[in-house]
Image (cartoon, rainbow, N blue to C red):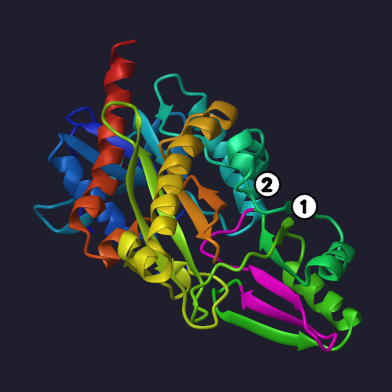
Amino acid sequence: MNMVNRHPQEKISLGVMVVYRRSIRTFPPFSDRGFYRRLSKFAEARGMEVLIFDPIFVDWNGKTVGGYLYRSETGKWHKVRRAIPPIIYDRCFYSGRSQFIRYSNAINRLRRIPSVRFLMRGLSGKWQVQQALALHPTLRKHLPETSVLTDLDQVFEWLEYKTSCILKPNGGSHGKKIVRVRKMPDGRCEVTGRDSANQPVHAVFDTRHHLRRWLREFIGTRKYLIQEYLSLHTADGRSFDVRSLVQKGGDGRWHITGMAARVGQPGSLTANIHGGGTGAPLLPFLQEHYEVMEVDDIMRRLQELSSLIPRHIERNIGQLVELGIDFGVDQSGRVWILEVNSKPGRSIFAQLQDVRRSRASVCNLLDYARYLFDRQLGG
């Protein structure tokens, strides 16, 4: 294990806050190492360094933290101890509420340090975002009907007049634990979706009693939303959505970094990349499945909403640095806002070998961090 002992003030330090995974046996002990490696390489060219750290391991007395740096000259990760970075990028993903509470205490202590600036304030859940979006008259028109699931009787009430509904965790990601419940013509109920390991789920229930018991066990104690089911699939039955990555850049303003289609596996409810979906260049994909006039309207609406959403959410919730916005497009060409994620992935551009947007998705982040750092120095 290598140790780097440079003075912490030699470079501008961007701290990336993560949750170490004890189940990961490789070194270093966190996910998304490929992304953080690229982030570190681009940072070096900007006179910056990227420290990956877990906030649980902050030394509050010494105002230091142990973490990991990637060095291009060695091609390796190095375990180091540094002063708490002045700019922090939150990439913590929690495995449960108890872990979230434990980390919230450490993160709140970091936020109270005057010399520390966070790139953004994370969104607390899908319902919070839904409520914020509904405040805007334009955005409200693009939201599927959604409610907090407080009782499983709501599922059966929805099935009476809509025949299908979506159940999704308020704090979930990557398409996990999302299911569709459908009332079949013969009166039985079918459940399709993905479990906590992102594996396909399919079950058919003869009675409400059996469905209720299964849903109670599947949902557990998590907060869930019940949402209108939308037919968001191609003519051949493959689900798809549109991922729009919007970020702040070196000028401190919002920019649309790029958009791409995500196409699900045959029979899959979601198109998420983590669930086996694949990326496709957006314009050719839309041209293949919609008429020319529809494509123009869809693209215009996606651009409009991608520009409007981050500014509106920021005004209502707090400072952000980037958002992954997932849109659905139904068979009539209507655009729907499905999800807004303040900790988005960006692998879709690498998968499409879109070098320009893949690079921009990393560099915009660093340029905005530099922008914040310079403003902080300027008072």
Q: Is residue 93 left or right of residue 231?
A: left
Q: Is residue 111 left or right of residue 282?
A: right
Q: Position of residue 246 (x, y in %)?
A: 38, 43
Q: Position of residue 315 (x, y in %)?
A: 54, 26
| Count of picture labels | 2
Residue drawn where x is 46% and y is 46% of the image: 301
Range drawn in magenta: 171-195
Q: Position of residue 285 (x, y in %)?
A: 36, 67
Amino acid at the residue labelled 2: Trp
- The quadrant of the image that shows the C terminus is top left
Amino acid at the residue labelled 1: Val
Is residue 191 located in the magenta-colored stretch of the structure? Answer: yes
Residue 204 figure quarter: bottom right
The residue lying furthest to the left in this view is: 73
Per the image, the residue denoted by label 1 is 148
Question: Residue 224 bears which disc, if any?
Answer: none
Per the image, the residue denoted by label 2 is 127
Secondary structure found at label 1: strand
Residue 316 figure quarter: top right
Is any atom of residue 241 visible in this view?
Answer: yes
Residue drawn where x is 42% and y is 66% of the image: 262
Is residue 184 located in the magenta-colored stretch of the structure? Answer: yes
Q: Earlier in the sequence, mark 1 or mark 2?
A: 2
Residue drawn where x is 35% and y is 65% of the image: 287
- The quadrant of the image that shows the N terminus is bottom left
Say above or below: 207 vs 347.
below
